[in-house]
Image: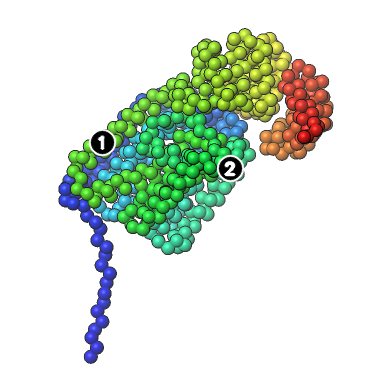
Amino acid sequence: MPRPHRQHSIPARKQPTAPASALRGYAPNRLQVTLALLLVFAAVTLTYSNHFHNGFHFDDTYAILLNPYLRDLHNVPLFFKDVHTGNAHAHSQTYRPLLTTFFAVDYWLGHGLEPLWFHVTAFAGFLAQLALMYLLFRRIFDAARPDPRNAWVALFATALYGLHPAMAETVNYIWQSGDLYSALAVIAGLAAYVGAPGLRRYGLYLLPVIAGLLIKQPTAVFPVLLFAWVWLFEEERFFKAAVRCIPAFLVIGALAYLSLRLSAATAAGFGSPYAFHISQPAVLLSYFRRFFVPLDLSADTDRKPYESLLEVDVILGFLFMGLVAAAVLWSRRRRATRPIAFGLVWYIVASVPTSWFAIGEVENDHRMYFPFVGLAMALCWAAALWVYARPVPRVAVLGACAFLLALAAWGTRQRNIVWHTEESLWLDVTRKSPKNGRGLMNYGLTQMTQGKYTVALDYFTRALQYAPDYPFLETNLGIVNASLHRDAEAEAHFLRAIRLAPTDSELPMYYARWLVAVSRVPEAIANLKHAIVLKPDNLECRQMLMGITARSGDAWELRAQAAATLALFPSDSVASGYLATTPAPPPNPPKPAVSADAAADRPQTTAESCLLRSLQLYRAQKYPESIAAAREALAIRPDYAEAWNNLMVAYNMVSDWDNAIAAGEKATQLAPSMALYRNNLAWARAEKAKASAPHP
């Protein structure tokens, strides 16, 4: 009789346990965890208590201070339809409608530009992110190595992140609160996926991620992080893990593509994509080092892109990337160390949006905000595994943790002080990033606003060494020279600024302000009208023009300008005030034979509308179409000097020097006092001479 077959079972792998001295007293109950989490919130709030009245800085100027659309909540639907309503600067108009909506609500809550409400809203999001980080970290750590002490590790990782000085670069920077909300959206989506597996079939975990995409595009890395979670902790077969993430890739990928398409026409780029990309490993190494030693944080660094793969920093950067990849592969081998792999993958993946797309600056410290979530996870878990495996006294562990958190909190409060005013912020930049031309200029600007013109001129002159072709630096040089009564130098700088950026509406506006001061009012009016054609929603420019017109006594023109302004901004008190104080127009002339409805339905093509279309096409770099639209304007109004000028600059962009010169001569003939037109004509002639010169 055959012997019965004995069934064999593979024994479950026994989790390593720490010595008794390291275990004693470490396992918390729910009440202790709740109280500890509240203590973390209190510590973070106390640390940031000196930041709530910090001012607006840097890109806040265009996104908030000079953005007239924020001043009326009725404009909220426009934020989702028109990318131009999100930022007053043409080269920073990315599609972030929900972020702009938050700013509009903050403006409404504060009854104006009160920084407190903007900071309160962002800080509430910061605390919500920390709460979700704790829940996510706890789930990840328990999935790797179940242990009641994991709650303390998750709390410490959350507290270290919340108190880290590098986070102050984002929490203090109102415009970059988009990074904060984006990270919050990704963490919320992952926490929902990991914590509520029964709801995955309904796709509810994607809702916060979709909202995050309407705030900032880096949210689009969510599907990759989701795949990393599934592959490391749920499904080890690569392709099956990928299949489970297909819904996220499809939905988020499609929305991210649409968002980028809406931003593509206006978003600023970088000079050399090759130099930008080879510099990024060194930048990521620099960010990694700042997690441990954040002593050189700067609001605007002076790191320049590297030109060669053989530079020492570039080589070290690529070695660092290799070490990170090796660490990910090594830590993935054992389930207990997989949070390290997940955290390092998070660090790299969250850095991709600012490392792959060649954007304006090669490095920016606020970009550490999202990637540092992964670093906090990986490094704190690595330290916890080391402690779990050794008889470390409880007092030593608590003392080390308390010391690190206190040191981080002190550093954060110091950064909050730096971010308090424009002067304190840019003074810090000039000290830590002395080769940053923009930083030197901005600090000089703070001195100019205090009437310290010679000090400002010194900083502007130093800035020229590092930013010789910066239009706004030229404009500020014009302003400071004008304040020192050096009118010839001032005008030369104003005109060079306009030549460097002929489609920027701010530059002719500042030039017009100086022209008014030197009693050249007709030229000022011409420059302001040109600026309004360049950017019809430049409210500051419109208000300046209305002020000049009001002083001239031309009531009818003033009324027309006020009505045009109110058509764009119905709540503008300046325009409504002018409209209320100017006489009513005369009675309407007899009605034409065509009915009013039919006349309203008939498309109205004017020289102004054709010129506006020509300028929009010019900004979109569609130069042949811009030329055609300018020709349409001239067919309606042959003496339209602004159209001749736009025709000239469009021909310049396609190197058709003869046509450019012919158009420029016509523009200067019609408007001989317009230095802008003479400047563009001189440039066309110079380029033609350069092209005609014999080559060696």
Q: Compute the Cα span from label 2 to label 1.
A: 44 Å
Which residue corresponds to mark 2? 274
Name which of mark 2 and mark 1 comes first in the sequence: 2
The front one of 400 and 547 is: 400
The kind of residue tagged 1 is: Ala
The kind of residue tagged 2 is: Tyr
Quadrant the C terminus occupies: top right
The front one of 144 and 44 is: 144
**Vertical order, 677 against 488 (above or below):** below
Q: Which tag is nearer the camera, tag 2 or tag 1?
A: 2
Q: How many marks?
A: 2
Q: Residue 537: percent from the left, percent from the top?
A: 63, 28
Q: Residue at x 73, y 34 (%)?
A: 653
**Vertical order, 22 against 426 (above or below):** below
The front one of 504 and 209 is: 504
Q: Is residue 546 left or right of residue 179?
A: right
Q: Residue at x 55, y 20 (%)?
A: 462
Q: Residue 361: percent from the left, percent from the top?
A: 53, 35
Of helix, strand and loop, which one carries label 2? helix
Which residue corresponds to mark 1? 402
Q: Is residue 171 left or right of residue 25?
A: right
